[in-house]
Image (cartoon, rainbow, N blue to C red):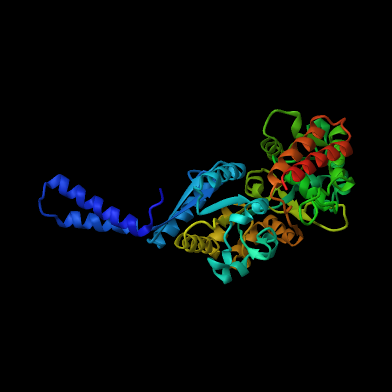
Amino acid sequence: MRINLKNAVALGLLATVIGVTGCSEGAPSTDNSQEGAAQNASAAEKVKVDFWSIWDPSQGNGKLMADAVKKFNDANPDIEVVMSGQGGYDGVAEKLEAALVAKNTPVIAQIEESFLGRYNPIAADLSKYMSKSTIDNYIEGLTRSSFADGVFKAAPMNRSTPILYMNADLVKAAGLDPAGPKTWSELQEYAKKLTDPAKGIYGFSGYWDTDAWYWESAVYSYGGEMVNKDGSQVAFDNEKGSSIVKLFQDMVKDKTMLNAYSAQENQSDLIKQNFLDGKVAMDFDSIGSMGQLVNNTKFNVSVAFQPQEGGKNSMVTGGANAIIIDKATEEQKKAAGKFLDFLSQDENVVNFFEQTGYLPTTKSALETPELKKWLQEKPQFQVAIDQLQFAHSRPWSKNWKAIYTSNVEFVKSALIDTSKDPKQVVHDAAVAAQKIIDENK
């Protein structure tokens, strides 16, 4: 049962009076009991904002976010943001679906950026609750999945892009251009020269991720698309969709690429550990791994833009945006907007970037003396920021989660069994994806 704010205050005061009367059997109230009643009334007047996060608030990135929540709550005694971890991107999505049915939604949800197509109908117009200066301050490359029909509905939070990590010492020893390969064909040549079987060194490694994110990004880099503009037709059933699958298969076959799907381990962890151990010379990974890979190696790490083969750079952005659920009360939506404004202040943006490696979300943060100095000391992060100019918008389809869950099983199968025809694999993926679209119009 939902109790409105006015009634909640009255009930809180009534409960306090009953409690005091029951304990003292009509004895006069003391100053302490009056103070307690005032505190209860004050607590009841707070606007509560439930914030569903992809992270566990007790550790890692979640702890950083929880610290920001506490800082905001301390500065705004009339608001209480309550953060709770929901088990990652898919966990938030699944629980939000259930909450919509039960009509028990949070006020803020941290959603994977491509999910706005699904949640657009329930997302509030953030321009009504966030300041215009904050919205205008977001880096353009990060807001290409923030608008629905021209309305700003999703605020950038932890955002990332794929990037190529290189063991700069091995690249130098091989006599290769330290700037790294510009195209996927050049990457293959780099990998051949960096591979050293005698030392157990592979020239390259990469994988598709649990949502085929890296494959999607590579398709854009070949000049392809996932779906058409309105999301009604699959658009990757062609060589632009299959070329990267064939390239990875060829590199696995000639033993210049560590095949992460040849083991039962977590693909991401396996590749990262081999890179850190100097056994993989190039790693196609997320900028979200920047801190770990740059700060924990015994060799120099350099980075390069994601390679391309279509004549121009184009890559996907990932990570999460925040939406405010439109069914929340006006007071809750205003409080939630204030919290999102707070997260976008320079101090918070810079701190989160430096601590995690996720991209800074605002233009003004890039101009702060602290961040400029930090980027001079860690130029790898500057490369990631520069790459944002080539950001590609994500598929606009309410069924995208189901589609990418299907896609990843197909493209993954091509590396589990490298004898499979990559064109047939991608064709089968496209047929399955189109079926999902057609059955859910």
Which residue: 81% across, 37% down? 257
Front residue of 300 and 390: 390
Q: Quadrant of residue 413?
A: top right
Q: Position of residue 375 (x, y in %)?
A: 65, 60
Which residue: 22% across, 57% down? 35
Q: Position of residue 127 (x, y in %)?
A: 58, 67
Front residue of 268 and 30: 30
Front residue of 281 and 271: 271
Q: Quadrant of residue 8?
A: bottom left
Q: Position of residue 220 (x, y in %)?
A: 81, 52
Which residue: 87% across, 37% down? 422
Which residue: 45% across, 59% down? 72
- Residue 372 placement, left or right of 341: right
Task: Report the number of numbered marks.
Answer: 0
- Residue 3 placement, left or right of 299: left
Q: Position of residue 410 (x, y in %)?
A: 79, 36
- Residue 67 placement, left or right of 419: left
